[in-house]
Image: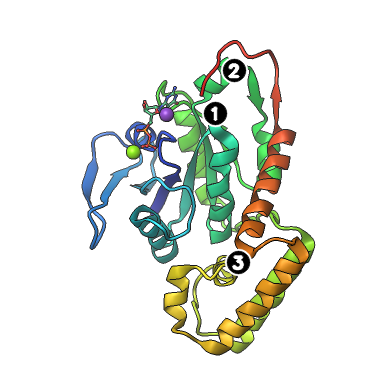
Amino acid sequence: MKYKIALAGNPNSGKTTLFNCLTGSNLYVGNWPGVTVEKKEGNLRDTNKDITLVDLPGIYSLAPYSMDEIVSRNFLLEERPDLIINIIDASNIERNLYLSTQLMELNCPMVGALNMMDVVKKTGVEIDVREMEKIFGYPFIEISAQKETGIDELIKLVEKTLEIKKLKEFPQIFPPEIMTLFNEFDELLQNKYPEILAGYPRLFRVIKLIEKDEEVLLKIHDNSDLLEDIAVVRKKIEVLSKHDVDSAIADYRYRFITAGISQATRKTKENTIQFQ
Ligand code: GDP
Ligand code: K
Ligand code: MG
């Protein structure tokens, strides 16, 4: 069995440093097809399994605004990796988890690597990784890519997560009344437009259509019936949230993250070191 896994995270989260820790010398460097964005692949070290690790360009979201975002997102949607290692700069945990809430919609097994823990520990912040798993629905591990701590444990966690056949249901990020709208729209898509973005993860497809994501709109070719159906859901979300759709969806994600973080972290001592 050959596995392909992806390393995804924000720019500056330590992706390159971690990639080098996890692979070693057997490295392939090239470009992503059609674009001059660097593509790096290597074999995961210290495992009996045949696991290729692909380093994705650093991104803040799965919105298609930059070439890096398009490359990362196309890889995740089209190549369907067996697992995502989501690297998170834990010294900037709330902002980094924003991408995580989007990755959670791809229906792919995931492991959260909380990086920069050497920095976090000095500030007296403790993160309860078991609690994080309960809240976010996938396992986390604390690492420092720079100090090379937690790397062996991360590799073990990746192996273990790959062996789990059935994907856990990720928790609901959005409140029940919004989830109801998403589910209704999902049903409508399946009944009325079964060919539209077939094969996309369902929740991802629903949200990207509702957001009128540029890349997704290109794929629906001005289907005016569908655009009308989208307008109807957008209106309902605006009424419920009292915001425009894009800020409402972003806002729900941040609320979910903020609540989760306050539950899973605690401060054990006063700040002795100021950073950022
Ligand atoms: P990338 O942009 O995600 O590829 O991030 P890099 O791997 O280039 O890392 C960004 C910066 O963070 C570099 O200066 C790294 O040396 C540093 N860095 C990476 N991991 C850690 C870590 O665990 N602890 C600390 N203190 N610095 C780190
Ligand atoms: K940095
Ligand atoms: Mg890098």
Assess whether mark 2 and mark 3 are in contact (beta carbons under 8 angstroms): no
Q: Residue at x 32, y 34 (%)?
A: 20
Q: Secondary structure at mark 3?
A: helix
Which image quadrant shows ligand 1? Answer: top left
Q: Mark 2 belongs to which amino acid?
A: Thr
> Is tag 1's residue or tag 3's residue first in the polypeptide sequence?
1
Residue beneath disc 1: 91
Assess whether mark 2 and mark 1 are in contact (beta carbons under 8 angstroms): yes
Q: Mark 1 belongs to which amino acid?
A: Ser
Q: Residue at x 71, y 67 (%)?
A: 238
> Is tag 3's residue or tag 2's residue first in the polypeptide sequence?
2
In the picture shown, does residue 120 fall above or below 68?
A: above
Residue beneath disc 3: 203
Disc 1 versus disc 2: distance between alpha carbons? Answer: 9 Å
Where residue 58 sits: x, y (%)? 39, 45
Residue beneath disc 2: 123
Ligand 1 within 8 Å of disc 2? The answer is no
